[in-house]
Image (cartoon, rainbow, N blue to C red):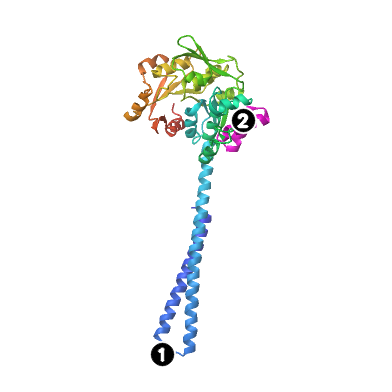
């Protein structure tokens, strides 16, 4: 307890002891009067009665003051303790590692929820090829970047995530023009139209949410994801690609040379540790790496670069893929190796969940360590699987590992 609290604590004690003393005097006076009542006149009895009532009333009043003072000072103490704890946490966050997290979709926003608890120096580098749902409709009607994945990352980095998540993810049912749009997507699109700059719009929304870190679109150019399937055919658009059952041979950008967001390069250069994934391999991870300049920055940085492996395979993208297949798709984009290691899940998914995934032709990713050895990567196993109708990564376990800095 602080010195001020001790001082206030003594104040309520004084009220307490004074009140008890006055009540004690009232009781003593009452019994003395009772024992000597036959020797006293009615006037003296009345005066003594008034004294007893006055002492008792003053005593009870002091006890009430003691109770009120105690509650008030305890509240002040709790607020001071909370303020000190919050200040200490903010200092810890400021002293946290510089982290660059590359990805998109729900995978990236999931791990950001844990990372924001260990550092305020987080840069989420987000893919901009989402052309489905609200994001796709907004892209058709206005210039800018698809806001869906960006919105999820902004909300995930907000200290007041609960209420902001409900607000920013609220989707309109009517009128028809707004049906299906989320409020967060509309805010990002609106600020983009006002400023004429998508990067500034994202920063402005980040300031509104008071996020810990930055959300950075990997490019601000209008770009489309394309895929060459195993039969040689080419599909355009993320939504079209993932809805096709044919295996993907490779993905590329159209146009192939969008201008990289320099903020993304700076985030990679400044990072102590870089996380790639988790998330959809072909539609969330690789589109970031395909933007010219990103692979080059990853090859130059002195930061540790870790791939967070997916726990389950994904329909339309990685059916039948093992861990080594995922790694090959990533490192195959670079002329030289850039990954430091891979973080894999060690928790066994329950039979019920496995059976649910199996109905869709999916399974738990096979961690084929023998095949992974050829990439000369460090492999770290963590209990990452969390089941909530589907399998996702445990953000806290991952954040605790990053916070320790023992890569």
Q: Residue furthest left?
A: 351
Q: Which residue position holds label 2?
A: 189
Residue at the outermost right position: 195
On screen, residue 69 above or below 238: below
| Region of the chain picked out in magenta, as a range | 183-212
Q: Nearer the viewer, mark 1 or mark 2?
A: 2
**Residue at mark 1:** 38
Q: Residues within 10 Å of mark 1 (few under 14, many from 20)?
A: few
Which is nearer the eye, 15 or 61? 61
Which residue shows up at 53% across the image and 47% down it?
83
Q: Residue at x 42, y 87 (%)?
A: 37
Q: Is residue 327 left or right of residue 190?
A: left
Taking 191 as reference, is 238 left or right? left
- Residue at 39% in and 85% down: 35
Q: Nearer the viewer, residue 270 or 315?
A: 315
Location of residue 298 in the rendering, given as x and y in whole percent from the top left corner: 53, 19
Front-most of residues 369 and 132: 132
Q: CA distance from mark 1 to mark 2?
A: 93 Å
Q: Secondary structure at mark 1?
A: helix
Where is the C terminus found, in terms of image quarters? top left
Magenta segment, prevailing SS (helix, strand or loop): helix
Magenta segment includes 197: yes
Residue 355 falls inside the magenta stretch: no
- The answer to which quarter of the image holds residue 201 is top right
Residue 182 horizontal side relative to residue 390, left or right:
right
Q: Residues within 10 Å of mark 2 (few under 14, many from 20)?
A: many
**Numbered marks: total:** 2
Residue 302 horizontal/vertical position (percent): 52, 21
């Amino acid at each position: 307890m602080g010195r001020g609290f001790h001082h206030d604590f003594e104040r309520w004690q004084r009220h307490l002891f004074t009140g008890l003393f006055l009540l004690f005097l009232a009781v003593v006076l009452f019994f003395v009067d009772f024992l000597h009542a036959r020797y006293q006149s009615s006037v003296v009895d009345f005066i003594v009665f008034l004294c007893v009532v006055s002492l008792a009333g003053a005593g009870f009043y002091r006890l009430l003051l003691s109770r009120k003072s105690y509650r008030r000072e305890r509240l002040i103490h709790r607020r001071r303790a909370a303020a000190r704890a919050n200040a200490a946490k903010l200092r810890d966050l400021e002293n946290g590692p510089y982290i660059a997290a590359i990805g998109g979709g729900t995978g990236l926003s999931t791990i950001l929820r844990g990372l924001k608890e260990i550092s305020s120096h987080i840069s989420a580098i987000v893919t901009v090829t989402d052309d489905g749902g609200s994001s796709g409709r907004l892209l058709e009607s206005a210039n800018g970047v698809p806001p869906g994945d960006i919105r999820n990352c902004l909300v995930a980095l907000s200290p007041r995530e609960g209420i902001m998540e409900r607000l920013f993810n609220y989707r309109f049912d009517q009128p028809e023009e707004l049906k299906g749009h989320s409020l967060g997507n509309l805010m990002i699109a609106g600020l983009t139209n006002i400023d004429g700059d998508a990067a500034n719009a994202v920063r402005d929304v980040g300031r509104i949410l008071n996020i810990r870190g930055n959300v950075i679109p990997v490019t601000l150019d209008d770009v489309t994801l394309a895929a060459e399937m195993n039969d040689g055919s080419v599909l355009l658009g993320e939504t079209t690609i993932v809805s096709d059952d044919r295996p993907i041979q490779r993905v590329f950008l159209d146009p192939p040379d969008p201008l990289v967001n320099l903020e993304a390069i700076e985030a990679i250069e400044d990072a102590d540790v870089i996380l790639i994934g988790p998330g959809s391999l072909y539609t969330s991870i690789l589109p970031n790496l395909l933007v010219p300049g990103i692979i080059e920055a990853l090859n130059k940085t002195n930061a540790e670069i870790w791939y967070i492996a997916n726990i389950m395979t994904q329909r339309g993208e990685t059916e039948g893929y093992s861990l080594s297949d995922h790694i090959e798709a990533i490192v195959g984009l670079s002329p030289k190796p850039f990954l430091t290691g891979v973080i894999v899940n060690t928790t066994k998914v329950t039979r019920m969940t496995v059976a649910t995934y199996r109905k869709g032709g999916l399974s738990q990713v096979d961690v084929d360590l023998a095949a992974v050895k050829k990439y000369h990567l460090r492999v770290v196993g963590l209990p990452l699987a969390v089941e909530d109708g589907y399998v996702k990564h445990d953000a806290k376990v991952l954040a605790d590992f990053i916070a320790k800095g023992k890569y």
